[in-house]
Amino acid sequence: MHEDQNTPYSSQDKPTMVSNDHSAEFAPNPTVLPYQRVYVLLMFALYMLLFIGIVYVAGDLETFSRALETTPAELTIMLAVLGVPTALLAITFLIGLFWNRGLGGWIYNLILICLGLTSGCTWPMTIPLLIFWIKQKNDIQYSRKQRG
């Protein structure tokens, strides 16, 4: 029999072997990344609002020290003790918003998720996020940002 070249099963349409080195083209988009970004953004907003409140209180020490029945010096020390870690945590979560790919980004954001586990209020968000963050480790490590 004569082979018809117009059939869908012609020899020209047979799949060909492709090399296994797709590292340059492989760019999965992990489904957990948008949720991680929302979590990090909410935590950044929380710490930033706390820092703004601390700065606001520091602006009117006399009034707030009378209301809290402390001296202005004591209130200044309390605000410094609360303000410095709050500012550092805000910066830490802001970095996590932009650095979330590769092995370093995966570990950094894993630590941020574990920081959220220290408060029971964030457990509904951090426990599922931790599970999916660990499940999609390879996708996060080997993915690149989508060019758009």
Image (tube, rainbow, N blue to C red):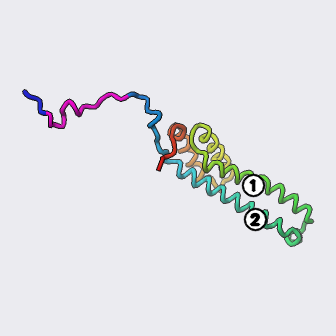
Residue 87's disc is: 1
Please say if 51 is above or below 137: below
Could you give the CA–CA distance between mark 1 and mark 2, rounded to whole angstroms?
11 Å
Whether residue 11 is in magenta: the answer is yes
Asked if residue 92 shows in the view, the reply is yes
Identify the secondary structure beneath mark 1: helix
Q: Give the side of residue 85 with respect to residue 68, left or right.
A: left
Mark 2, other Cα within 10 Å: few <14 / some 14–19 / many ≥20: some
Majority SS type along the magenta span = loop
Q: Farthest residue to the left: give it.
A: 1
To which quarter of the image does residue 131 belong? top right
Relative image position of residue 29 (x, y in whole percent) = 47, 45
Please say if 107 is above or below 53: above
Q: Amino acid at mark 1?
A: Ala
Whether residue 37 is in magenta: the answer is no
Relative image position of residue 65 (x, y in whole percent) = 88, 68
Q: Give the side of residue 143 with respect to residue 80, left or right.
A: left
- Image quadrant holding the N terminus, namely top left
To which quarter of the image does residue 59 belong? bottom right
Q: Give the side of residue 50 with respect to residue 126, left or right.
A: right
To which quarter of the image does residue 54 belong? bottom right
Q: Which residue is mark 2?
A: 53
Identify the residue at horizontal 20%, vertical 30% (top origin).
11
Mark 1, other Cα within 10 Å: few <14 / some 14–19 / many ≥20: some
Identify the secondary structure beneath mark 2: helix
Query: Which badge, 1 or 2, is on the more N-terminal residue?
Result: 2
Identify the residue at horizontal 15%, vertical 36% (top origin).
7
The magenta-colored residue range is: 5-18
Q: Give the side of residue 23 with respect to residue 94, left or right.
A: left
